[in-house]
C-alpha cells in the first residue's frame, strides 16, 4: 500500500493537478463583419500564430468595449479593439495599451432607406446603432456632427454588430445605420442607398488594433513580440493570398455572397497598414473630441494609450520590408 501511494504521488507530481495546468491564452476578435477582424482570422486559419510559436485560441466577443472588459478581468491575453474604447478604458484606470494597428481610418458609410433623399433627412429617423465606445458609434456621431444633426435628434436603438445592424435596416425595422464596406454592398443589393460616405473623408482614426495589459508586456514581452510579428505577417498574407483570404472571410462571416466578399477584400486591401503602427494623430483627434465632455481626456497624452516598443523592433529588424521584398 505504501508503494502504491508513493507511485500515485509520483504520477501526480509529474502530470500536475488540474489547478496547476497551464491556462490557454485567448485572443478576442470583436467583430464578425468583413473588415473588423480579418487579420485575426487569417493569422489563425493560415497557421501564422503557430508559425511564430504561439498557442493562441481565438474567441469572438461582440464589441471592443466587452473585449477590453474581458481583458481587464483576466479572461483574455489580447483583444481586438478600436481607439475610442481603448481611450475610455485607459481614462477609467484600465492598465492597457495598443501594441499594433491594422487600419488607421474610419471605413464607414451611413446607409439607409432609399426614401431618405439627403443627410439632413436623417433627423428624427430611427437608427440601428452599436454600443457606445465602439468605432461604429463614434463614426455615426461624427457623421451626424458633420451635417449638423445632434445625436439626440435621431431615434437610436442599440442593435449590435454590422451584420445585425444592416439586417435591421434591410428588413424595415430601422431607417438607417452605419456600416463598413461589406455591409454596404449587402445593403445596396437589398435596395438601400449610401447617404454619407465617411471613407472618402480619410479621417485619421484608430480603427482595428490589438491591445493587451501593460502587465502582460512587463511579464511576457517575448509572447507580445511574437503576437505583433505574427499579425504583421497575417496582413502580408491577406494582401498576397487573395483566394485563401476570401475563403477565410467566407468561413467567419457564415457564407456571405462572393461579390460582397470581393468588395470587402478590395476595401481591406487599400486600408490595411503594412507597418502596423497605430495612428497617433487619430488618437489625438479622438482625445480632442472626448475632451469636450470628459476633463480627463483633456489632460491625457497620446503616449498613455500605446506601447510602440514592439512595432519599433519590427521596423528596426526590417521584417515587413523583407516580407514585401523591399530589401
Image (cartoon, rainbow, N blue to C red):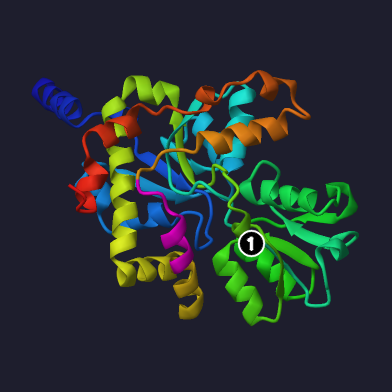
- Residue 22 showing in the rendered view: no
- Left or right: 86 in relation to 22: right
The quadrant of the image that shows the N terminus is top left
Q: Is residue 326 located in the magenta-colored stretch of the structure?
A: no
Q: Position of residue 212 (x, y in %)?
A: 44, 32
Bounds of the magenta segment: 266-274
In this view, 259 is above or below 277 = below
Q: Which residue is mark 1?
A: 179
Q: In terms of secondary structure, where does tag 1 sit?
A: strand
Residue, x 12% and y 20% (percent of image)? 2
Q: Residue at 67%, 81% (x, y): give it.
A: 190
- Name the residue nearer the viewer: 95 or 296: 296
Q: Inspect this view and state whether residue 96 appears.
A: yes
**Residue 271 shown in magenta:** yes
**Left or right of 124: which side holds 174?**
left
Q: In the rendering, at what x and y percent does residue 128 appear?
A: 75, 60
Q: Is residue 96 left or right of residue 141?
A: left
Q: Is residue 140 above or below residue 260?
A: above
Amino acid at each position: 500500500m505504501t508503494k502504491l501511494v508513493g507511485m500515485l504521488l509520483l504520477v501526480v507530481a509529474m502530470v500536475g493537478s488540474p489547478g496547476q495546468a497551464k491556462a490557454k491564452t485567448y485572443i478576442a476578435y470583436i467583430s464578425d463583419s468583413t473588415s473588423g477582424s480579418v487579420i485575426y482570422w487569417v493569422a489563425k486559419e493560415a497557421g501564422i500564430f503557430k508559425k511564430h510559436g504561439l498557442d493562441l485560441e481565438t474567441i469572438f466577443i461582440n464589441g471592443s468595449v466587452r473585449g477590453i472588459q474581458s481583458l481587464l478581468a483576466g479572461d483574455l491575453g489580447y483583444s481586438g479593439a478600436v481607439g475610442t474604447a481603448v481611450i475610455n478604458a485607459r481614462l477609467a484606470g484600465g492598465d492597457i495599451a495598443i501594441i499594433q494597428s491594422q487600419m488607421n481610418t474610419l471605413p464607414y458609410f451611413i446607409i439607409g432607406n432609399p426614401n431618405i433623399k439627403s443627410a439632413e433627412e436623417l433627423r428624427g429617423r430611427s437608427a440601428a446603432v452599436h454600443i457606445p465606445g465602439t468605432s461604429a458609434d463614434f463614426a455615426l456621431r461624427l457623421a451626424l456632427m458633420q451635417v449638423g444633426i445632434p445625436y439626440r435628434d435621431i431615434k437610436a436603438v442599440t442593435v449590435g454588430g454590422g451584420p445585425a445592424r444592416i439586417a435591421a435596416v434591410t428588413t424595415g425595422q430601422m431607417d438607417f445605420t452605419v456600416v463598413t464596406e461589406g455591409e454596404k454592398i449587402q445593403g445596396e443589393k437589398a435596395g438601400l442607398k449610401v447617404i454619407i460616405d465617411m471613407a472618402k473623408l480619410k479621417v485619421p482614426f484608430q480603427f482595428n488594433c490589438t491591445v493587451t495589459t501593460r502587465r502582460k508586456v512587463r511579464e511576457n514581452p517575448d509572447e507580445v513580440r511574437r503576437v505583433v510579428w505574427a499579425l504583421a505577417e497575417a496582413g502580408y498574407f491577406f494582401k498576397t493570398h487573395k483566394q485563401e483570404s476570401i475563403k477565410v472571410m467566407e468561413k467567419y462571416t457564415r457564407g456571405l455572397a462572393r461579390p460582397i466578399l470581393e468588395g470587402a477584400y478590395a476595401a481591406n486591401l487599400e486600408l490595411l497598414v503594412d507597418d502596423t503602427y497605430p495612428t497617433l494623430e487619430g488618437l489625438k483627434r479622438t482625445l480632442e473630441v472626448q475632451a469636450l465632455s470628459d476633463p480627463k481626456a483633456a489632460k491625457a497624452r497620446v503616449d498613455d494609450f500605446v506601447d510602440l516598443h514592439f512595432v519599433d523592433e519590427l521596423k528596426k529588424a526590417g521584417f515587413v520590408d523583407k516580407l514585401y521584398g523591399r530589401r
